Image: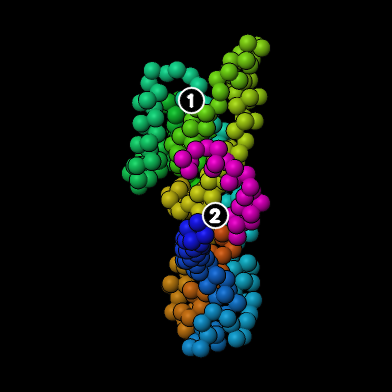
Amino acid sequence: MLEALIKKRVAGGIGKFLRYMLLINLSFIILFPFIAKICAMFMSFNDTVDPTVKFIARQPTLSNILYVLFNTNYFEALRNTALLSVTYAALTTASCALVGYGLAKFRLKSAGLFICLLVLTLLIPPQTVMLPVFSYFTYFDPFGIITLIFGAPINLSGTLWPMIILGAIGFGFRAGLFTLIFRQFFTGVPDQLMEAAYVDGSGVFRTFAQIAIPLSRPVMITVFLFSFCWQWTDTFYSSLLFNNLPLMANSISSIITNFNSAGALYISYTATIVVNTAVIFAVLPIIIIFIVFQKGFVQGIERSGIVE
């Protein structure tokens, strides 16, 4: 009996050790590039040419940070990207929640077809719709109404309106995935709650606003954070529709282009460091937001059925 207990504890200890080793290795693989970029932020020119310097700078400096903050349009790009990401994430969360609620709680004959189309949107690469999306917003004229009133289509490219429209109609980036997440959650909500609200005289939208939305708060936080982060780091729509608008992705791309086009020795050695500094400052708001909403994010993943 004692021998069996010892073998069980030894086996459990070995299993726990292997799990921790696996988690440590995965954490190292994920965090090492980030830590290396943070260390490089404080390297001076002499550190870049010193073969003995690997990560810790011998002559630390703040010049790289000051260059990114004050010699680029970082603050303007931060403001524009934050405004775009928050607005787009809020509209996408609201529209996808409404569609997901309808697919989960209403008996539609074509619900299966809609779900298949949602899955199909996840499989189609965004480059496939690049030209139609660009043409649609460059010559924006839904149903010919604008031409009828003003005589010609209007050009929305270079403004924030394309992503606002896509978010409001649930046609934005990864909107199909978000709709499926909401449908998965609302499917697990008892129908008796909705039926009780209908008996009390609530309509469909009132029931959705007063019953479904409060129940789905953790899932909404998760979808909002997903949508916010993907929009914040987006390069597809930023380069397609907002090429001249100062956004975070455009700013980093312009920094890389400027350094690649220069040939000075100092610039050639420090280009990578400055670019890494810009990347750190670009993802810093996302890290802060995740730390603040971490609890709600984890709860939303558990309740949405993503891990099932």
Q: CA distance from mark 2 to mark 1?
A: 37 Å
Image location (x, y in percent) of residue 298: 58, 46
Please say whether residue 33 is visible from this viewpoint. yes
In the visual, does 200 lie left or right of 16? Answer: right
Image location (x, y in percent) of residue 44: 58, 82
Image location (x, y in percent) of residue 39: 57, 75
Looking at the image, residue 71 lies above or below residue 47: above
Looking at the image, residue 195 lies above or below residue 238: above
> What segment carries the magenta color?
284-308
Residue found 52% across the figure and 28% down from its top: 188
Image location (x, y in percent) of residue 68: 59, 68
Please tell me which of labels 2 and 1 falls first in the chain.
1
Disc 1 marks which amino acid?
Answer: Ala
Q: Nearer the viewer, residue 304 or 177?
A: 304
Residue found 37% across the figure and 25% down from its top: 112
Residue for badge 1:
104
Crowdedness of circle 2 by 10 Å Cα count: few (<14), some, many (20+)? Answer: many
Residue found 56% across the figure and 59% down from its top: 283
Mark number, residue 247: 2
Residue found 46% across the figure and 34% down from its top: 180
Q: Nearer the viewer, residue 124 or 106?
A: 106
In the visual, does 130 lie left or right of 103? Answer: left
Q: Where on the picture, by quarter, is residue 135?
A: top left
Q: Are marks 2 and 1 in contact (CB under 8 Å)?
A: no
Disc 2 marks which amino acid?
Answer: Leu
